[in-house]
């Protein structure tokens, strides 16, 4: 069963063909980084227009790379929520046109839920369920209870910035080019970098909270680089140390330690809270751009081995936004009897239900 999937939720125009929800035959992607880097973030209007220009060439590339013909396609999947509405509409329109022209079912997929199955692509066996799911990206930071690969219930999510957004902003403060997350990670891995040089805050929130918060960490980076603001009537704080190359490496490594610690702390809490309520997770499913992070990958690997859990981390090509994960989840949904019709709409927000741990 071949699924052709479209992904246009943000700034990547992507199309992929996946067999049986699992085996990736092609994964074509046209990134727009160069169009947005001068603005320090994604400009929705520019993103939408670029998707329109690129979607058909990217689809043709996906079909050619897979070595199949459009006539061989059995279903069309599309990430229809959440995301930038003008961007989502391009993918949804292309997917509807393809499904109608090919006479095959159309399957709408939640982009965030698709990140959760990215680690099952190109594998031979499905992991044991239920799983604790983690999505960490530039737009999302949340944990999920995943009863099966086509279901998800949200346990907690960020109350302010997503972790990838905090990475990108911290990187900008350090003078690194956008998107700075991978650049900050590279600096943090330098053997000369000291991850204990600066004691950045690790947000815990209230006892037992399963939400995240990264805005305090971002502000702490700002103060560490530019100095703490002077308060009226108080003596001025000492100026921050000069931003030498060594200081930049140390700040990057210290930020990375605090950011990863904050994520892992909540993962530990979630496993315990679920276990206390009688749900024993057997697997960790992680996805999203920040699962490409070197330290987070190591810490997730340690957590899984300490707790005797299976870990499904996506291959690097499936961490960042891609259409293989959309085709993967779309194929799985169709095999589970779930599909949509041509009335499918694009939505800026996710509708994954929340799960209250008792
Ligand atoms: O999943 P994704 O492509 O897009 C969203 O759905 O947001 O994730 C992009 C995010 C960006 O914030 C980027 O800086 C971050 O993932 N990212 C990283 C790394 N690679 C990508 N953050 C930290 N370390 C990395 N190695
Ligand atoms: Zn994403």
Image (tube, rainbow, N blue to C red):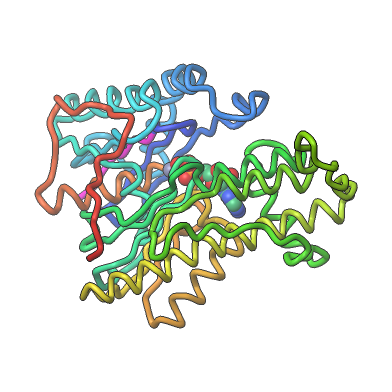
Highlighted magenta segment, given as a residue range: 1-7
User: Measuring 49% from the left and 69% from the top, which residue is drawn there?
Assistant: 300
Q: Give coordinates of residue 151: x percent, y percent.
A: 21, 55
Magenta stretch prevailing secondary structure: strand
Q: Give coordinates of residue 237: x percent, y percent.
A: 83, 46
User: Measuring 28% from the left and 70% from the top, which residue is drawn there?
Assistant: 274
Looking at the image, in which quadrant does ligand 2 appear? top left
Question: Image quarter for residue 48?
Answer: top left
Total marks shown come to 0
* Residue 350 visible to the viewer: yes
Tell me if 144 is positioned left or right of 311 in this view: left
In-front residue for pair 188/354:
354
Residue that protrudes farthest toward the left in the picture: 337
* Magenta stretch: includes residue 80: no
Up/down of 38 relative to 7, above or below: above
User: Measuring 40% from the left and 58% from the top, which residue is drawn there?
Assistant: 134
Up/down of 232 relative to 44, above or below: below
Residue that protrudes farthest toward the front in the picture: 233
């Amino acid at each position: 069963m071949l699924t052709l999937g479209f992904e246009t939720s943000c700034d990547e125009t992507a199309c992929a063909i996946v067999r049986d929800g699992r085996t990736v035959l092609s994964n074509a992607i046209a990134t727009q980084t160069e169009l947005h880097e001068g603005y320090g973030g994604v400009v929705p209007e520019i993103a939408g227009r670029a998707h329109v220009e690129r979607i058909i060439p990217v689809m043709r590339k996906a079909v050619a790379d897979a070595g199949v013909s459009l006539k061989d396609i059995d279903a069309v999947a599309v990430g229809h929520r959440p995301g930038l509405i003008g961007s989502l509409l391009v993918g949804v329109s292309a997917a509807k046109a393809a499904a109608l022209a090919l006479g095959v079912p159309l399957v709408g997929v939640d982009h965030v839920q698709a990140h959760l199955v990215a680690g099952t692509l190109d594998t031979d066996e499905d992991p044991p369920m239920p799983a604790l799911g983690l999505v960490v990206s530039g737009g999302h930071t949340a944990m999920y209870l995943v009863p099966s690969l086509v279901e998800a219930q949200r346990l907690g999510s960020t109350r302010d910035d997503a972790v990838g957004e905090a990475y990108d902003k911290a990187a900008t403060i350090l003078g690194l080019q956008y998107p700075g997350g991978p650049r900050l990670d590279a600096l943090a891995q330098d053997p000369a970098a000291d991850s204990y040089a600066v004691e950045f805050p690790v947000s815990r929130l209230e006892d037992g909270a399963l939400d995240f918060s990264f805005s305090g960490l971002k502000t702490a980076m700002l103060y560490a680089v530019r100095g703490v603001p002077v308060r009226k009537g108080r003596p001025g704080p000492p100026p921050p140390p000069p931003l030498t190359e060594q200081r930049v490496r140390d700040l990057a490594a210290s930020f990375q330690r605090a950011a990863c610690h904050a994520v892992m702390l909540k993962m530990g809490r979630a496993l315990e809270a679920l276990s206390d309520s009688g749900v024993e997770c057997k697997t960790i499913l992680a996805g999203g751009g920040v699962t490409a992070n070197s330290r987070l990958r190591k810490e997730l690997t340690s957590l899984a081995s300490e707790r005797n859990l299976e870990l499904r981390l996506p291959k690097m090509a499936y961490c960042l936004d891609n259409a293989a994960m959309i085709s993967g989840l779309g194929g799985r949904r169709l095999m589970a009897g779930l599909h949509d019709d041509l009335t499918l709409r694009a939505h800026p927000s996710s509708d994954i239900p929340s799960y209250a741990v008792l």
